[in-house]
Amino acid sequence: MSTRRRSRYNRDVKIQDLHGWQVSTSQARAIQQELAARVLRSGTIISPRFIAGTDISIDKVSGIATAAVVVLDYPGLRIVESRLVRGEPGFPYIPGFLSFRELPLILTACQQLAITPDLIFTDGHGIAHPRRLGVASHLGLLLDTPTIGCAKSLLCGQYQEPGFEAGSNAEIVDRDEVIGAAVRTRTGVKPVYVSIGHRLDLETAIYWAQQCCRGYRLPEPTRLAHLVAGSHLKQNQAAANVAVTYEH
């Protein structure tokens, strides 16, 4: 597939008009509660050609955020495209509401892609969230694309420590509901927390998290997105530096 951009925006990346972004915390909570019921917790991915990862980095001095989306081929897991978007977050940092802070930038980066991914990993949670709508689920609904949440820390729920060996996993349970899994992606290393984002089941999410690991704790899509967002990895293609404004 050619990566030549046909226009400024990828017409294949269609963002669902689900809500506005200039909202209060109480409005954001209501949006989460309404959208959580729309998340599809079933589905499988058999043979994805392109798998994307997203992450965001915020400069502590300037407050400017850099959102990165990288697209990897599969099974090679080589970067075939990456995009950066920089802008000032339009929502404050409040745990449990990070998607309102991060997604406007991430969505703009996704629109700059020439390649449309079949599956997207996010550095954050899916339904393993107090209101069952973390950044992965929110992004999945907005793009109507299968997504997986893969987080480095637990937001809610409890689990029994999985086995020591890579591939071991244990269910994360919150209020008697299985919301994700602690997955040991590397022997002897702290697990990552995998959850359904949208349009797939937990077994599928765990499978692809493991399939996308290459000897590191984090799956390659989010590991490389993290490096690109933090300017620790040179992009394979020129970044699209887009100034983002937030409409009232």
Image: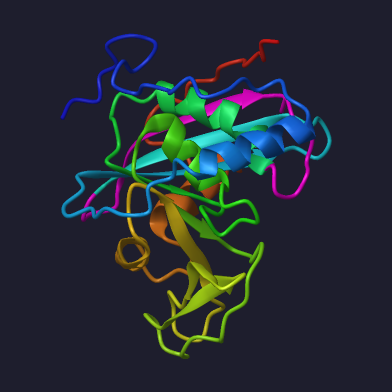
How does the figure colour the protein chain or chains? rainbow
Along the horizontal axis of the image, is 202 left or right of 130?
left
| Above or below, 164 relative to 234 | below
Q: What quarter of the picture does the N terminus occupy? A: top left
- Residue drawn at x 43%, y 56% is 196
Residue at the farthest right position:
61
Quadrant of res 101: top right
Considering the whole magenta stretch, tell me its main secondary structure: loop
Along the horizontal axis of the image, is 64 left or right of 46?
right
* In magenta stretch: residue 92: yes
- Residue drawn at x 29%, y 16% is 5
Q: Please state the horizontal and vertical placement of residue 192, each as a whole percent of the image.
A: 52, 69
- Residue drawn at x 29%, y 65% is 211
Q: What quarter of the picture does the C terminus occupy? A: top right
Magenta residues, start to end: 74-97
Residue 158 seen anywhere in this rendered image of the structure = yes
* In magenta stretch: residue 209: no
| Above or below, 87 relative to 201 | above
Q: Please state the horizontal and vertical placement of residue 62, each as a whole percent of the image.
A: 81, 30
Q: Please state the horizontal and vertical placement of residue 197, each as a whole percent of the image.
A: 44, 50
Residue 233 seen anywhere in this rendered image of the structure = no
Residue at the farthest bottom position:
164
Give the number of callouts: 0
Question: Which residue is at the front of the view, 172 or 232?
Answer: 172
Quadrant of res 20: top right
| Above or below, 66 relative to 20 | below
